[in-house]
Amino acid sequence: QVQLVESGGGLAQAGGSLRLSCAASGRTDSRYDMGWFRQAPGKERELVGCIKWNSGSTYYGDSVKGRFTISNPKNMVYLQMNSLKPEDTAVYYCAASIRDPYSTTCPTTASSYNYWGAGTQVTVSS
């Protein structure tokens, strides 16, 4: 059983930065693609970005492209968020997927992920 624990959320001003961390434990297999999702009140959960376990290649949602960066050293996954906007306010979730580890791209749909963290709140004030 994989456990994921997010940290680093909080309050930031528009234009500021935050770094979210996700600690993964309980993995007996290293072939997990990792993703970050977010969900704002009244909205569906959306992909922020994801990273392949082997190549390190990444994919980002259009709304965060150029502002957010995912990295995945060892058993941690980081989400560096720069140039924050009020519309980035949401609960952010870390997720792990082993559904198709040898695909060349990381999974972009929530249903492709096997394990989820409890989430961390990010609030961006204007």
Image: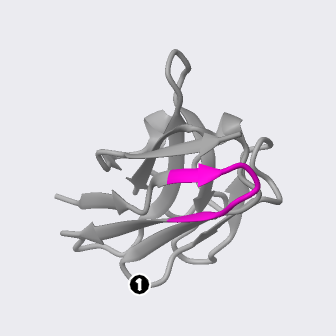
Left/right placement of residue 107 relative to residue 10 reads: right
Farthest-out residue, bottom: 74
Against 13, is 91 above or below? Answer: above
Give the colouring mode of the picture.
one colour
Residue range corresponding to the magenta coloring: 11-19
The percent coordinates of residue 99 (x first, y second) are 42, 50
Q: Is residue 49 magenta?
A: no
Residue at disc 1, secondary structure: loop
Residue labelled with disc 1:
74
Name the amino acid type tagged 1: Lys
Up the image or down, 37 lies above or below 29; here it is above
In the image, 27 versus 25, the foreground residue is 25
Image quadrant for the N terminus?
Answer: bottom left
Q: Residue furthest top?
A: 42
Q: Residue at x 51, y 54 (%)?
A: 35
Residue 21 image point, x, y percent: 43, 67
- As drawn, is 40 to the left or to the right of 117? right
**Looking at the image, which is closer to me, 55 or 84?**
84
Residue 100 shows up from this direction: no
Instruction: Give residue 81's quadrant in the image.
Output: bottom right
Tell me if mark 1 has few (under 14), some (14-19) or many (20+) residues whose alpha carbon lies within 10 angstroms of its own: few
Splitting the image into 4 quarters, where does residue 46 fall? top right
94 or 100: nearer the eye?
94
Q: Is residue 18 magenta-colored?
A: yes
- Residue shown at the point (71%, 39%) measured from the top left: 126
Q: Give the residue drawn at x 29%, y 45%.
A: 118
Q: Residue at x 40, y 75 (%)?
A: 76
